[in-house]
C-alpha cells in the first residue's frame, strides 16, 4: 500500500468510500431513525446481558468455541505437499504456468542484458525525454548509475525484469476485471472482499503454498507479487469508469454506440487517469514485496538486504533499500510521464521548443543505438564496470552508531532523556496497560461493545459485520494475540494522526514545507521495512515499542499526504468566502477547512490504519509479538495453519477498522 | 486534428504498443524456454546451492562453489532462499543441494523417508549447540550465572520495561523451535520470554546491551560467526535426556539436544552430476573452518570467491578429501528438532 | 462628489498575473495586445490603471466580458487579491496599507461579499452559514441566531434554518449567500456575478429583492455582472471593462445612449433604447419660449422614451420637457425621439471592434 509523490495523491481514491446517495433528511425520517436506533441498542444490550450470563467474566475467548482451524489449514498444506508432483491439476496446469512465468522473466532479463547498461539507461531516460520530462530523464540517469556504482546493477535488472512482468500481468488481468466490476454490481460485490483479502493478507502467510504450487524463483515471486499488488488497478479502473459523468455516457449512447464502443471510445479514455494511478500503485506495492519475494529465491535487490540483515549491517541494507526506492520512483515517474503525454492536449499553446518533436525522436533513437553499441563493444555487456564502485555502507553504519550513542541513553536529550527512556516510558505506562486491558475485556463484551460502537457510527449492517468480524478473530484462535496487536495498532495510529495531521496542515500553510516533506515521505513509504528493522531495535529495544515505531514510520505518510490533499482540494471560493468575513487562520482551519476536508481526513485515518496493519508483520520481526509474530513463525517453522490463521485475523481486523471508518460519512451529507 | 480524436489516437497507439510489448515478452519467453530445455541436455548442468539467511550457510556455499567450479568444472549458482521453501525446491530439483540443515524432522520424514525425492548427504561436521547464553563480561561480574540456578537467583538483573516486573529472556529467529518458555516455567525462573522475531532484531538488541555492558540473557547457538565478534558464555541447563525429549513441549525441563548439522541433495543429482554428488557427500569441515570464512566475508569484507580461495589455498589436503574421499556419516534428525 | 460621501475610492489600480508580475506595471510592454503580451512574457494584465469612486448608497455596476478582470477588481477591494499598484480606500480606511489585524477588521465589519457559485459551506446548516460572519466576530450563539432568524425572514427562508445547503435549490442557496453577507450589517456589499448562475425568472426575483432591500438599507454596492439588463436595472452607474481597463463609466443612459466605442456599443446594441433613455436624453432646446405653447403636451425629463412615444405620436407638434419646478428645459418632436431610439451602432461598426476572446476559465484551473 505504498504511495509515491504526485500520482499518489489520489491513490487514496482506491479505497475511497462510496458516497451515500442523496438523502434529504426530513423530520420524520430523523425521528424514525432515532426510534430504530434506540430499539437496536436495546437489543444489543439484551444480547450482552444474555451472553454475560452464559459466558461469565473471564477474559480470553472460550476455547470451546475455537475449532481447530489451524490444523485444518495444515492438512490442506500437507495434501498439497504430498500431491504436488502427482496431481494432474498441478502437473499439467500450474507447473506449466509457473514455467512460463519464470521463462518470461528470464527472457526479459536477457533483453536487458543485451541492451547493456548504457543501453538500458538510454532507453529509460529516452522514454522520459520523449514524454517531455527532461527532469525525469535526468533522475533516471542518476538513479541507474547509482545501481551500478553500488555494485547492484545485475540485481537491479533482475528485480526490474521480475517487477515488469508482475506489473504487466496485474494490468492485463486487472483492467478487464475492473471493467467487469464496473459493469455489474454482482461482480463488484463479489470482487470487493477478495480484493480486501488479497491486499491485507500478509504475503508471509501464503508463501509456502505458492512455492509448493508454482515452485521457487521467479514464478512464485510473480504470483506472490500479483496477489498482493493487483487490487489497486482493479479498484481504480472501476472507480475511473464509475466517475465518467453520466451525461457523457448518455452523449455516447445518443450516437448509437454499442456497449463495446462506449467502453472503448468514451469510458476507457476518460478513465485513463485513474487507471494510470492504479498502475502506479501496482508498481509501488510490487516493489514493496521485493524482499519477501527474495525469500523464495527470486534473487534481485532483496538478496543483499537479507544478507546484510544476517550480519546486522544496516549500511548495506540501506544502500540496497535505496536502490529499491529508486527503482520504484523510476517506474512510477516514467509510467506517469508516458500516460500524461498520451492524455495531453496536443494543440496546447505553441511553446517554442529547442528541438522539434520529430528531431527529438530521431536524436533519442540514435542515442539509444549508440549506447547499446557502446555498451556491447566497450562496456562489457550487461554488467556495470566493477572498477566504478562506491562504498556507502561503512559511513552509514558509523553515522548510525553515532546516532545511537547520542540518542539512546539517558541524559542524551532534554526532558525525554533519550529514546531508551522514551521507549521504557511508553511501554510501561501506555502499551503494557493497554494490552492488559484489551486482553482482559470479557469476550462477549468485546464483541457487543464493538458492535454498539459500530452501530452508533456506521449503522445496523456494519454493526453486524463488525460483530461477526470480532467473533471470527476469536474463532480463529487469535484472541489474545489480536489484543496485543490491537494495542500497538491503536497507539501507532494515535501517533500517526497526532503527528501526521498537524504536519499535513503545516504543509498546507507553508508550501515550502511540503516540498521538503515530499521526498522524505516517498522514501519512508517505499523503503522496504526490512531495512529499518535494525535501526528501530537499536533505538527502541526489542519489544512492542519497536513494533509501534516501525508501524508509525511506515504509516505516517498517508496521514500527512491525505490531510494535505484534503485541504488543498477545498474549493477556492469557499476559502475566499471565509476570508472575506475576516476569519483568522485558525478560525479558517477550525470552521471552514477542516470540516470541508472531513471526508478526505477520514480517508486518511482509514488508510493510516490499513498501513499500520500492513506493518504488523514487521512488528512481529522486531519482537512486538502478536499476530505479526504468529505469521512470521508460520513461515519460519512451517506452521502454515498458524500463519494463515494469524494472517486472516489481521485481515479481519483490517476489514473491521475499514468498515468502521468508512461508515462515518454516511451520517450526514458533506 | 481535434483534441479528442488525437487523444484517442494516442491511446490507441499506447494500447498497440502495450500489446506489442506483451506479445514480444510471450515470444521471448517461448525462446527462453526452448533454450533452457536445450540447456538440460547439455553435459554440465548448473549446480544450485541454497544460501539460507545465516552467514555460516554462505560460507559453506562459497567454498563449495569455488571447488565445484575450479576442480569439478560445473557451473554453480547460489540461491538465496528461506529454509522451508528449500525443501520442496530440493525435492523438485530446482535446487541441487543444501549444505547445512538444522533439524527439520518433519520435512525429513516427508521428503527423505517418505517420497525419496531428497537424499540425506551426510553430516557437515559442526554440531549445532543451542542453549542459553550471556555475554562473558556478565559472567565475570556474576560467576553464579554459569548455571541456571544462578539465573534463577539473579532474575532481577534482567528486568526490562517490556517484561516488568519479570526478567526478560530474549529469544531469536522464529524458525527455530525453542523450549525457553517451557524451561523458564518448569525451572521456576521469574522471567518472561520475549521473541525478537528475527535474528537481526535479536542481534541488534544483544549488540546494544554489549556496547553498554548491560546484563542480558538470550537463546543462542554455535556455530555462529558472531561468536567470533563477541564473547558469549553458555549457561548450563539440566542435562538433555531422551526421557525429557519425550515430554510434551510445554513441560520440557532439560537442555536442548545436540543438532548434528547435515546436508541434503536432490535424489537425481548422483546421476546428473556424479562427481558433484560425491563431493557434496564428502564435504565436511569444522565450526572453526566455517567461522574463519564467515569472518573474512562479514568483517574483513572479502568477496565470496576471495574468501573461498584463501581458505582452499591454505587447506589443500582437506579439499582433496572432499573430492576423492568417502561420504561422511549419516544421522537423521530427531523428533522435536 | 463630496469627500465624506465617498465610500469606495480607487486610484490607478494595477494587477498583473504571471511571472513578471508587478514589474510590468506602467511599462511599454503592458500596453501590448493581451495575446502578444502573453506570448512575450507569459503575463496577463487583469487590472489596468483603473480609478473610480463610489458614493455612499450608490450601486456601482462593473460590466465586461469573461476574463476582462471584473472578479479580480472586486476581490482586490478587500485584498482577496493583492493589487500591484494603486490606492484603495474603503469607508475612509486605507486598505492597501492596512496590516493583518486592520484588514481583518475591515473584512469583519465594513464589507461583505456574495459569490457567483454561492460559496456556501456545505458542512454547515443554513443557520450556521448565515451566522458565519458573526461567529467569526465572536458574537454569542443566542445573539447570532436571533439575527439570523431576522435575516432568514427577510430573504424568505424561515423554514429552512436547519437544512444543509445541498438540500436547497440554486435560488434558495443564493438567498442564503445574501443573508450571510447582510448578517454582519456591512456598509459595503460586493456582488460577484451573484445571480449569473440562476435561471432568468429566479434571477429577476433576486434582482427585485436587492432593489427592495436597497430601498430600505441604502448600502453601498459594487455589483459585477455581464448581463446588461441586470446592470441597467440595478446600477446607478455602470463601468464597462475591457482587458482590465475601464472603457467607459457613466449612468445607464450615458452608456446606452452614447457608447464610447464599438466595444461598449456591442454590449448595448440589443438593449431596447426606449426603455433606458429618457426624455432628457432626446430633448432639444425649446423653440417656443413659453410653457403654454405646448398646451398639455408636456412630459418630465425622467420619463422613459417608451413613455414619451405615445405623446409625440399623438400630435404633429413638439412636446415640452418640464422639470419638477415647473420650468421648461427642452422640447421633443417625433423626429428627435425616433432618432434617439434608432441611433444604435451599425453592425459594421460593431464588427470591426474585435471583442476580446473569452479568457480561459482560470478559476477552475487554480482550483485544480
Ligand atoms: N490567479 C490568477 N492567476 C493567473 N491569471 C489570473 C488569475 N486570476 C485571474 N487571472 C487572469 O486575469 C484575467 C481576469 O480574470 P477575472 O476572473 O478577473 O475575469 P472576469 O472578468 O471576472 O471573468 P468572468 O466573467 O469569466 O468571471 C483573466 O485573463 C484571467 O486569466
Ligand atoms: Mg469573474
Image: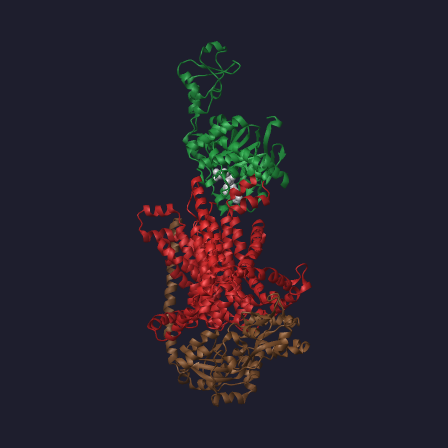
Chain colours: A red, B brown, C green
Image height of A70 relative to A517, above or below = below
x and y percentages locating residue A61 in the rendered image:
48, 63
x and y percentages locating residue B97 in the rendered image:
45, 80
Q: Is residue C238 left or right of residue B233?
A: left
Q: Is residue B26 left or right of residue C301?
A: left
Q: Is residue C366 left or right of residue C98?
A: left
Q: Is residue A294 visible?
A: no
Front residue (pair A227, A565): A227
Residue situated furthest front in the rendering: A53
Front residue (pair B99, C316): B99
Q: Is residue C114 visible?
A: yes
Residue situated furthest top in the rendering: C292
Image height of A576 relative to A76, above or below = above
Q: Is residue A20 left or right of residue C96?
A: left
Image height of C314 relative to B205, above or below = above
x and y percentages locating residue A78 in the rendered image:
40, 73
Image height of B331 relative to A648, above or below = below
Front residue (pair C340, C4): C4
User: How many numbered circles are shown?
Assistant: 0
Quick one: quadrant of the N terminus of chain C? top right
x and y percentages locating residue A22 in the rendered image:
42, 44
Amino acid at each position: 500500500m505504498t504511495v509515491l509523490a504526485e500520482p499518489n495523491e489520489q491513490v487514496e481514491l482506491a479505497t475511497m468510500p462510496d458516497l451515500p446517495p442523496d438523502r434529504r433528511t426530513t423530520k420524520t425520517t430523523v425521528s424514525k431513525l432515532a426510534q430504530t436506533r434506540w430499539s437496536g441498542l436495546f437489543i444489543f444490550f439484551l444480547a450482552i446481558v444474555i451472553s454475560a450470563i452464559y459466558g461469565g467474566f473471564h477474559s480470553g475467548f472460550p476455547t470451546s468455541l475455537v475449532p481447530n482451524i489451524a490444523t485444518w489449514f495444515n492438512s490442506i498444506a500437507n495434501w498439497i505437499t504430498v500431491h504436488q508432483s502427482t496431481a494432474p491439476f498441478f502437473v499439467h496446469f500450474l507447473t506449466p504456468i509457473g514455467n512460463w512465468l519464470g521463462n518470461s522473466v528470464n527472457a526479459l532479463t536477457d533483453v536487458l542484458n543485451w541492451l547493456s547498461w548504457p543501453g538500458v539507461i538510454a532507453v529509460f531516460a529516452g522514454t522520459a525525454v520523449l514524454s517531455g520530462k527532461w527532469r525525469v530523464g535526468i533522475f533516471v540517469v542518476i538513479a541507474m548509475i547509482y545501481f551500478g556504482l553500488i555494485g547492484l546493477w545485475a540485481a537491479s535488472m533482475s528485480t526490474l525484469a521480475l517487477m515488469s512482468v508482475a506489473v504487466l500481468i496485474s494490468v492485463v488481468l486487472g483492467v478487464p476485471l475492473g471493467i467487469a466490476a464496473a459493469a455489474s454490481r454482482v461482480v463488484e460485490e463479489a470482487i470487493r472482499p477478495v480484493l480486501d483479502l488479497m491486499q491485507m493478507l500478509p504475503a508471509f502467510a501464503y508463501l509456502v503454498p505458492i512455492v509448493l504450487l508454482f515452485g521457487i524463483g521467479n514464478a512464485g515471486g510473480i504470483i506472490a507479487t500479483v496477489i498482493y499488488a493487483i487490487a489497486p488497478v482493479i479498484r481504480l479502473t472501476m472507480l475511473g469508469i464509475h466517475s465518467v459523468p453520466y451525461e457523457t455516457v448518455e452523449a455516447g449512447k445518443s450516437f448509437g454506440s454499442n456497449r463495446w464502443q462506449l467502453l472503448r471510445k468514451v469510458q476507457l479514455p476518460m478513465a485513463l487517469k485513474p487507471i494510470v494511478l492504479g498502475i502506479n500503485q501496482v508498481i509501488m506495492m510490487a516493489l514493496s514485496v521485493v524482499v519477501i519475494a527474495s525469500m523464495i529465491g527470486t534473487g534481485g535487490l532483496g538478496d543483499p538486504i537479507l544478507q546484510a540483515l544476517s550480519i546486522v549491517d544496516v549500511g548495506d541494507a540501506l544502500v540496497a533499500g535505496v536502490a529499491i526506492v529508486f527503482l520504484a520512483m523510476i517506474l512510477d515517474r516514467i509510467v506517469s510521464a508516458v500516460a500524461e503525454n498520451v492524455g495531453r492536449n496536443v494543440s496546447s499553446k505553441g511553446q517554442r521548443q529547442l528541438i522539434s518533436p520529430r528531431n527529438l525522436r530521431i536524436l533519442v533513437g540514435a542515442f539509444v543505438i549508440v549506447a547499446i553499441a557502446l555498451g556491447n563493444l566497450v562496456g562489457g555487456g550487461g554488467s556495470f564496470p566493477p572498477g566504478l564502485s562506491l562504498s556507502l555502507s561503512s559511513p552509514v553504519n558509523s553515522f548510525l552508531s553515532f546516532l545511537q550513542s547520542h540518542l539512546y541513553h539517558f541524559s542524551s536529550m532534554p526532558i525525554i532523556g533519550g529514546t531508551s527512556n522514551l521507549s521504557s516510558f511508553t511501554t510501561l505506562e501506555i502499551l503494557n496497560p493497554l494490552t492488559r486491558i484489551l486482553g482482559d475485556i470479557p469476550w462477549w463484551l468485546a464483541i457487543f461493545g464493538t458492535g454498539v460502537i459500530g452501530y452508533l457510527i456506521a449503522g445496523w449492517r456494519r454493526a453486524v459485520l463488525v460483530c461477526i468480524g470480532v467473533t471470527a478473530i476469536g474463532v480463529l484462535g487469535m484472541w489474545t494475540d489480536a489484543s496485543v496487536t490491537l494495542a500497538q495498532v491503536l497507539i501507532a495510529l494515535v501517533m500517526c494522526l497526532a503527528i501526521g495531521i498537524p504536519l499535513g496542515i503545516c504543509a498546507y500553510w507553508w508550501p515550502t514545507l511540503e516540498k521538503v516533506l515530499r521526498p522524505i515521505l516517498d522514501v519512508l513509504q517505499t523503503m522496504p521495512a526490512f531495512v529499518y528493522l535494525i535501526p528501530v531495535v537499536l533505538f527502541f529495544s526489542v519489544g512492542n515499542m519497536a513494533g509501534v515505531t516501525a508501524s508509525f514510520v511506515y504509516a505516517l505518510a498517508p496521514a500527512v499526504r491525505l490531510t494535505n490533499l484534503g485541504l488543498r482540494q477545498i474549493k477556492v471560493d469557499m476559502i475566499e468566502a471565509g476570508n472575506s468575513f475576516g476569519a483568522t487562520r485558525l478560525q479558517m482551519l477550525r470552521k471552514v477547512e477542516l470540516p470541508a476536508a472531513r471526508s478526505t481526513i477520514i480517508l486518511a485515518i482509514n488508510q493510516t490504519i490499513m498501513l499500520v496493519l500492513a506493518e504488523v508483520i514487521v512488528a512481529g520481526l522486531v519482537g512486538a509479538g502478536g499476530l505479526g509474530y504468529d505469521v512470521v513463525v508460520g513461515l519460519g517453522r512451517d506452521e502454515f495453519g498458524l500463519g494463515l490463521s494469524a494472517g486472516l485475523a489481521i485481515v479481519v481486523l483490517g476489514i473491521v477498522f475499514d468498515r468502521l471508518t468508512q461508515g462515518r460519512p454516511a451520517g450526514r451529507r458533506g | 486534428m481535434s483534441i479528442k480524436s488525437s487523444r484517442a489516437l494516442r491511446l490507441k497507439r499506447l494500447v498497440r504498443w502495450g500489446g506489442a510489448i506483451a506479445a514480444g515478452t510471450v515470444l521471448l519467453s517461448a525462446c527462453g524456454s526452448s533454450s533452457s530445455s536445450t540447456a538440460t541436455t547439455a553435459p554440465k548442468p548448473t549446480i544450485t546451492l541454497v544460501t539460507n539467511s545465516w552467514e555460516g550457510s554462505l560460507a559453506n556455499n562459497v567454498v563449495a562453489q569455488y571447488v565445484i567450479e575450479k576442480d569439478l568444472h560445473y557451473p554453480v549458482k547460489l540461491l538465496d532462499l528461506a529454509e522451508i521453501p528449500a525443501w520442496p525446491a530440493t525435492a523438485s530439483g530446482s535446487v541441487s543441494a543444501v549444505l547445512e540443515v538444522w533439524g527439520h524432522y518433519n520435512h525429513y520424514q516427508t521428503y527423505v523417508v517418505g517420497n525419496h525425492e531428497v537424499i540425506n548427504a551426510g553430516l557437515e561436521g559442526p554440531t549445532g549447540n543451542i542453549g542459553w547464553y550471556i555475554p562473558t563480561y556478565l559472567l565475570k561480574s556474576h560467576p553464579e550465572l554459569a548455571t541456571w540456578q544462578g539465573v534463577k537467583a539473579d532474575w532481577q538483573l534482567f528486568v526490562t520495561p517490556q517484561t516488568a516486573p519479570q526478567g526478560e529472556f530474549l529469544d531469536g529467529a522464529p524458525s527455530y523451535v525453542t523450549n525457553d518458555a517451557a524451561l523458564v516455567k518448569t525451572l521456576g525462573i521469574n522471567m518472561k520470554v520475549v521473541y525478537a522475531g528475527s535474528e537481526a532484531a535479536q542481534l541488534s538488541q544483544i549488540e546494544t546491551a554489549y556496547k553498554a555492558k548491560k546484563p542480558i540473557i538470550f537463546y543462542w547457538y554455535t556455530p555462529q560467526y558472531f561468536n567470533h565478534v563477541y564473547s558469549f558464555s553458555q549457561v548450563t541447563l539440566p542435562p538433555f535426556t531422551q526421557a525429557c525429549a519425550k515430554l510434551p513441549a510445554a513441560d520440557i525441563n532439560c537442555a536442548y539436544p545436540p543438532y548434528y548439522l547435515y546436508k541434503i541433495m536432490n535424489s537425481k543429482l548422483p546421476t546428473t552430476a556424479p562427481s558433484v554428488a560425491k563431493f557434496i557427500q564428502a564435504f565436511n569441515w569444522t565450526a572453526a573452518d566455517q567461522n574463519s570464512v564467515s569472518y573474512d566475508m562479514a568483517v574483513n569484507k572479502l568477496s565470496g570467491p576471495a574468501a573461498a580461495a584463501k581458505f582452499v589455498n591454505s587447506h589443500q589436503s582437506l579439499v582433496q578429501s572432499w573430492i576423492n574421499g568417502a561420504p561422511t556419516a549419516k544421522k537423521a534428525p530427531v523428533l522435536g528438532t | 462628489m463630496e469627500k465624506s460621501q465617498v465610500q469606495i475610492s480607487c486610484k490607478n489600480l494595477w494587477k498583473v498575473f504571471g511571472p513578471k508580475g508587478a514589474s510590468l506595471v506602467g511599462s511599454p510592454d503592458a500596453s501590448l495586445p493581451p495575446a502578444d503580451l502573453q506570448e512575450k512574457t507569459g503575463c496577463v494584465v487583469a487590472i489596468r490603471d483603473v480609478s473610480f469612486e463610489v458614493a455612499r448608497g450608490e450601486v456601482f455596476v462593473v460590466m465586461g466580458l469573461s476574463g476582462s478582470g471584473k472578479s479580480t477588481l472586486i476581490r482586490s477591494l478587500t485584498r482577496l487579491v493583492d493589487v500591484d499598484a494603486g490606492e484603495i480606500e474603503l469607508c475612509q480606511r486605507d486598505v492597501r496599507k492596512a496590516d493583518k489585524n486592520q484588514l481583518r477588521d475591515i473584512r469583519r465589519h465594513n464589507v461583505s461579499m456574495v459569490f457567483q457559485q454561492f460559496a456556501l459551506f456545505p458542512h454547515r446548516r443554513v443557520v450556521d452559514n448565515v451566522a458565519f460572519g458573526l461567529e467569526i466576530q465572536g458574537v454569542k450563539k443566542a445573539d447570532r441566531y436571533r439575527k439570523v432568524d431576522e435575516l432568514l425572514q427577510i430573504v424568505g427562508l424561515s423554514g429552512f434554518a436547519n437544512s444543509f445547503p445541498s438540500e436547497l435549490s440554486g435560488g434558495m442557496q443564493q438567498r442564503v449567500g445574501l443573508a450571510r453577507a447582510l448578517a454582519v450589517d456591512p456598509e459595503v456589499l460586493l456582488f460577484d456575478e451573484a445571480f449569473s448562475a440562476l435561471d432568468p425568472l429566479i434571477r429577476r426575483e433576486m434582482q427585485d429583492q436587492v432593489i427592495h432591500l436597497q430601498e430600505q438599507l441604502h448600502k453601498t454596492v459594487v455589483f459585477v455582472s455581464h448581463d446588461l439588463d441586470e446592470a441597467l436595472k440595478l446600477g446607478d452607474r455602470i463601468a464597462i471593462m475591457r482587458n482590465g481597463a475601464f472603457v467607459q463609466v457613466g449612468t445607464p443612459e450615458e452608456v446606452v445612449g452614447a457608447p464610447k466605442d464599438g466595444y461598449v456599443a456591442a454590449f448595448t446594441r440589443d438593449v431596447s433604447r426606449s426603455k433606458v433613455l429618457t426624455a432628457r436624453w432626446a430633448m432639444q432646446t425649446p423653440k417656443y419660449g413659453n410653457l403654454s405653447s405646448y398646451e398639455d403636451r408636456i412630459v418630465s425629463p425622467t420619463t422613459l422614451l417608451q413613455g414619451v412615444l405615445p405623446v409625440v405620436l399623438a400630435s404633429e407638434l413638439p412636446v415640452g420637457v418640464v422639470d419638477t419646478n415647473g420650468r421648461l428645459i427642452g422640447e421633443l418632436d417625433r423626429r428627435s425621439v425616433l432618432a434617439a431610439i434608432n441611433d444604435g451602432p451599425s453592425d459594421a461598426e460593431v464588427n470591426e471592434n474585435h471583442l476580446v476572446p473569452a479568457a480561459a476559465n482560470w478559476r477552475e484551473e487554480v482550483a485544480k
